[in-house]
């Protein structure tokens, strides 16, 4: 199928999953090297799911000064960070087991409520060195991060000026068994200079094409990211 051509995104296409993994890893490595050299510290925000896991494993093998790198999350399920279904668990077991000198910034804090965790996340991202890059995924429903179409909290999350928001995705198929979430918002993403969308498979490309032609981000929340000004969304897609 023919990849979409749209001035709001920069699309890189691959036939080989290994080539896809290596290309994304090289870009991230370059950004982190530049950021640590120029600013002394870098912060990278990562997503959950099976799609980015090979990238995390590859990035962990790179000779970066991990002691100068913070690793945060784009979003998280309302689960213990030790739960195998949490994004924190995925990042720990694919990246941080090898890049053990990096500083991990989880979104869920034991003993705190969801709203308290959101408050802490907003303080953390505001007071710490700003993230230089964020890796996003996208579901077949057009959601990205934990911005799920059909959620009663989606309009507020899309329009808030806060970097992170709580979201209840009860009844949203894409949320599966974990409806309560903390998610990065378009306001938070808008301050990040390097934004990546990682996609695998023809179905995801079709969803992206539909989102590009859709006018309402409440129907396809990925549109809220595509429409952010100043920086093109870099889409790495593998067939």
Image: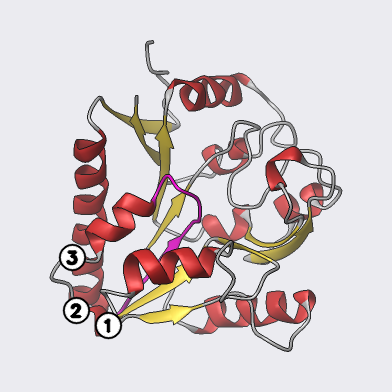
**Residue 143 found in image quarter:** top right
Horizontal and vertical percent position of residue 44: 39, 66
Mark 2, Cα crowd under 10 Å, few <14 / some 14-19 / many 20+, is some
Q: Residue at 49%, 56% (x, y): give it.
A: 47
**In the shown orientation, is residue 198 left or right of residue 216?**
left
* Discs 2, 1 touching: Cβ within 8 Å: yes
Magenta stretch: residue 232 in it? no
Instruction: Assign the C terminus to one quadrant of the image.
Output: top left
Identify the mark at residue 117; answer none if there is no mark. Answer: none
- Is the Cβ of the residue at disc 2 closer than 8 Å to that at disc 3? no
Left or right, 95 with reference to 77: left
Secondary structure under tag 2 reads loop
Magenta-highlighted residues: 40-52
Asked if 172 appears above or below 111 in the picture, the reply is above
* x and y, in percent, of residue 225 in the image: 56, 43
Looking at the image, which residue is at 42% across and 44% down? Answer: 51
- What percent of the width, then of the height, locates residue 86? 58, 65
Badge nearest the viewer, 2 or 3: 3
Disc 1: which residue: 68
- Whichever of callouts 3 and 1 sits on the residue coming sooner in the sequence is 3
- The residue wearing badge 3 is 61
Work out whether residue 143 can be spotted: yes
Number of residues whose C-alpha sits closer than 10 Å to that of mark 3, classed few (under 14), some (14–19) or many (20 or more): few
Q: Residue 50, percent across and down?
A: 45, 48
User: How far apart, in angstroms, are the residues tagged by discs 2 and 1?
Assistant: 6 Å
Q: Main secondary structure of the magenta part?
A: loop
Toward the bottom, the furthest residue is: 111
Residue on which disc 2 sits: 65
Residue extending farthest top: 1
């Amino acid at each position: 199928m023919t990849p979409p051509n749209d001035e709001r995104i920069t699309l890189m296409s691959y036939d080989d999953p290994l080539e896809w993994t290596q290309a994304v890893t090289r870009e991230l490595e370059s950004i982190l090297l530049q950021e640590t050299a120029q600013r002394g510290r870098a912060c990278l925000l990562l997503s959950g799911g099976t799609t980015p896991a090979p990238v995390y494993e590859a990035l962990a093998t790179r000779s970066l000064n991990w002691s100068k790198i913070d690793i945060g999350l784009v979003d998280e399920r309302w689960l213990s960070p030790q739960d195998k279904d949490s994004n924190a668990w995925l990042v720990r077991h694919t990246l941080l087991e090898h890049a053990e000198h990096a500083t991990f910034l989880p979104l869920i804090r034991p003993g705190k409520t969801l709203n308290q965790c959101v408050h802490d996340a907003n303080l953390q991202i505001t007071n710490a060195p700003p993230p230089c890059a964020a890796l996003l995924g996208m579901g077949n429903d057009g959601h990205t991060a934990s911005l799920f179409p059909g959620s009663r909290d989606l309009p507020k999350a899309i329009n808030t000026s806060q970097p992170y928001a709580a979201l209840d995705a009860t009844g949203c198929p894409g949320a599966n068994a974990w409806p309560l979430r903390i998610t990065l918002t378009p306001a938070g993403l808008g301050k990040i200079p390097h934004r990546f969308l990682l996609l695998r498979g023809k179905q995801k490309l079709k969803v992206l094409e539909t989102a590009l032609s859709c006018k309402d981000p409440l129907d396809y929340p990925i549109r809220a990211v595509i429409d952010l000004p100043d920086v093109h969304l870099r889409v790495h897609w593998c067939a």
